[in-house]
Structures are given as C-alpha cells and as structure tokens.
Image (cartoon, grey):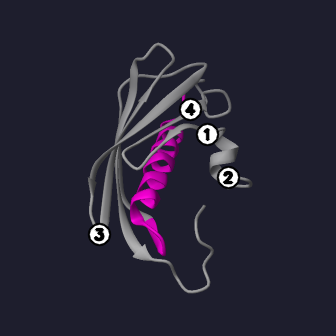
Amino acid sequence: MSHGTLMERMGIEFTEVSPERLVATMPVAGNTQPYGLLHGGASVVLAETLGSFGAVLNAGEGKIAVGIDINATHHRAARAGLVTGVATLLSAGNTMVSYEIVISDEDGRRCCTSRLTCLIRDLPPGAPAAG
C-alpha cells in the first residue's frame, strides 16, 4: 500500500494499528535538515500518516478521510536512530476524526506533539478503495 508514496520514502513503518491507537517508527537518517537534526516537516509527515490511517479506519467502508487541520509543537531535536509516533484517538464522529500524535526519540523523550483533524467524505466515484 505504501509503494511509491511519501511514507515509503520517509521510511515509516507501522508497528501497531487499531482505530483507537496507531504506532509507527521513522528513521532520523535521511529525514534531517541541514544541521543534522530531524526536520520538523518530517515529524509532521509522520504525524499526518498516523492520524490519516486512523481516520480511514474510523471512516468505514465507502468513505475516505482527508486532513483538514494539523499542528505541531517541536519540543526537542532528534539526531539519530528512530523516532516513534503514537497516535491516540481524541474524537470520532460521522464527519470528523481527531488524533493526538506524540513523537518520541529512542530514549522516550518527547520530540513533537501534534494534533490532526480529518474530514470523512464519501469515496468519489471510480476512486480505488483504501486497503
């Protein structure tokens, strides 16, 4: 499902998936800014990937989820290894789903806190179903 996507290029790998909680890792290497620190945008990509997948799980058959709002607070820099994102469901309704995503380094220190809200829509005619 991730072949040829940004998720593949960033090295994001899911380790836990349920509608209430999703966990994925991403390497710092290859996702840094010029100073060798994890790029803030890479953290946002990880957060949106986790929350969007969760929203799709909550949306149900014949529905899609599209991100409409994301924010991120960067607390500390990651310099090496893997970061882990944990998305926790905040709210799931018929039209909107929100997650809080916490990204931590290998020592368990919080690097970023993000919140994503997705709009639930009907699958457009002729569009491939997720999964």
Which sits in the foreground, 126 or 26? 126
Instruction: Say which residue label 2 marks.
Output: 2
Identify the mark at residue 25; answer none if there is no mark.
Answer: 4
Q: Nearer the viewer, mark 1 or mark 3?
A: 3
Q: Residue furthest right?
A: 4
- Region in magenta: 37-65
Q: Where residue 89 appears, x then y in whole percent?
A: 32, 46
Q: Work out which quarter of the rendered image holds the N terminus and state it.
A: bottom right
Asked if disc 4 and disc 1 are in contact, CB closer than 8 Å, the reply is: yes
* Tag 2: amino acid: Ser
Kindly state the secondary structure of the residue where label 2 is placed: loop
Task: Single out the residue that lies furthest toward the bottom.
Answer: 125
Check disc 3 and give the amino acid type. Asn
* Residue 105 seen by the camera: yes
- Of residues 97 and 59, which is closer to you in this image? 59
Mark 1 to mark 3 CA distance (whole Å): 28 Å
- Residue 59, given in percent of the width and then of the height, sits at 40, 65
Q: Residue furthest top?
A: 107
Proximity of marks 3 and 4: CB atoms separated by less than 8 Å = no
Which residue is the site of mark 3?
A: 94
- Quote the CA–CA distance across marks 1 and 2: 9 Å
* Residue 33 visible, this angle: no
Indicate the quadrant where residue 103 lies.
top left
Q: Are marks 2 and 3 in contact (CB under 8 Å)?
A: no
Mark 2 nearby-residue class (10 Å; few <14, some 14–19, many ≥20): few
Residue pointed to by mark 1: 12
The span from disc 2 to disc 4 (Cα, nearest Å) is 14 Å
Q: Do callouts 1 and 3 mark residues in contact (Cβ within 8 Å)?
A: no
Which residue is rendered at x = 51% and y = 22% of the image?
78
Secondary structure type for disc 1: loop
**Which sits earlier in the primary sequence, circle 1 or circle 3?**
1
The image shows residue 84 at horizontal and vertical percentages of 50, 29
